[in-house]
Image (tube, rainbow, N blue to C red):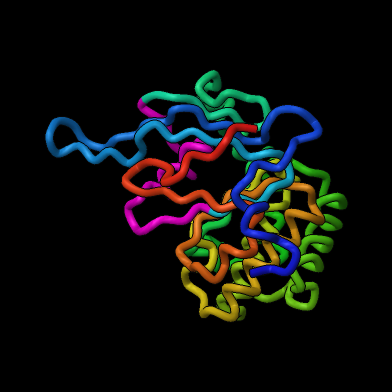
Amino acid sequence: MTEGISAQSRTAVVEDPAGGAMVRVENLHRSYGTGASAVHALRGVSFSVPHGELVALKGRSGSGKTTLLNLVGGLDTPDSGSVTVDGTELSGLGEHGLLELRRDRIGFVFQSFGLIPILTAAENVGVPMRLRRTDPKVREERVALLLALVGLADHAGRRPGELSGGQQQRVAIARALANRPALLIADEPTGQLDAETGLAVMELLRAVVRSEGVTALVATHDAALLGLADRVLELGDGGLVEPAPQA
């Protein structure tokens, strides 16, 4: 467990001085299929995440972690209930609005890294800013800053195949931060890494939450990593094992 973070502090919502939560999920339901064969991935999930908090989602495979992250990130829509991100209720957005939300306000980190093999580390980090038509000089400066932040300033010209798994995930984290998102969503970001490298990546995620001022929602199956979170939410059978109090 990280020094200075007690079990109590990880299970209570931190007071949000700005008022309101970065993420608010209310009575969320999501099922796949119909009739007797329907799978109820989420059953009435409600919680909130204050600005600047790193929240870990834990639960066995099939507990609904990925479904929940997809709904919060605007990659899927619920059967009922609501998701609000940084004051914006997602159901009120059309497809164009959701695209803008994902491009400008949410950063994604996946287990599979998702880097473009033919591009260098620097070019991969710069992709979101190219899509946003960021000025080239500003883009280059931001790429250099982010690669330095994740400890890869000397690897800018290397392609993914020339990097270790941990280095590739660091590039993916830098890319997720490219457009200065308010929310970082990470789905099993250490799932393909050994224990030591996975811990280093999780420590990096915590560091960038602090340095970049973002909020993070991270799904992980690794109990050793949960102590690095400000708070842990456990999912089981589509619901929170212990419902979290609201901010």
Residue 150 location, quadrant: bottom right
Q: Residue furthest top?
A: 92
In the rendered image, residue 140, in percent from the top left (x then y), is placed at 82, 57
Q: Quadrant of residue 172?
A: bottom right
Q: Position of residue 203 (x, y in %)?
A: 68, 68
In the picture as drawn, the residue positioned furthest to the front comes out as 8
Count the labels in the image: 0
Q: Given the current orientation, which residue lies at the most extreme left position?
A: 36
The answer to whether residue 137 is seen in the rendering is yes
Q: Is residue 99 magenta?
A: no
User: Considering depth in this image, is 229 or 30 the residue closer to the camera?
Assistant: 229
* Rendered-image quadrant of the N terminus: bottom right
Asked if residue 39 lies left or right of residue 110, the reply is left
- Which residue appears at 60% of the width and 67% of the height? 169
Q: Is residue 100 something one can see in this rendering?
A: no
Span colored in magenta: 57-79
* Residue at point 54%, 26% (across, down): 90
Quadrant housing the C terminus? top right
Q: Is residue 146 left or right of residue 25?
A: right
Instruction: Please tell me in which quadrant of the rendered image residue 120 appears.
Output: bottom right
Asked if the stretch drawn in magenta spans residue 60, the answer is yes
As drawn, is 144 to the left or to the right of 228? right
Tell me: residue 202, above or below residue 33: below
Q: Position of residue 77 (x, y in %)?
A: 42, 31
Q: Residue at x 59, y 49 (%)?
A: 11
Q: Residue at x 73, y 51 (%)?
A: 178
Front residue of this view, candidates 79 and 242: 242
133 up-or-down from 170: above or below: above
Q: Position of residue 176 (x, y in %)?
A: 65, 53
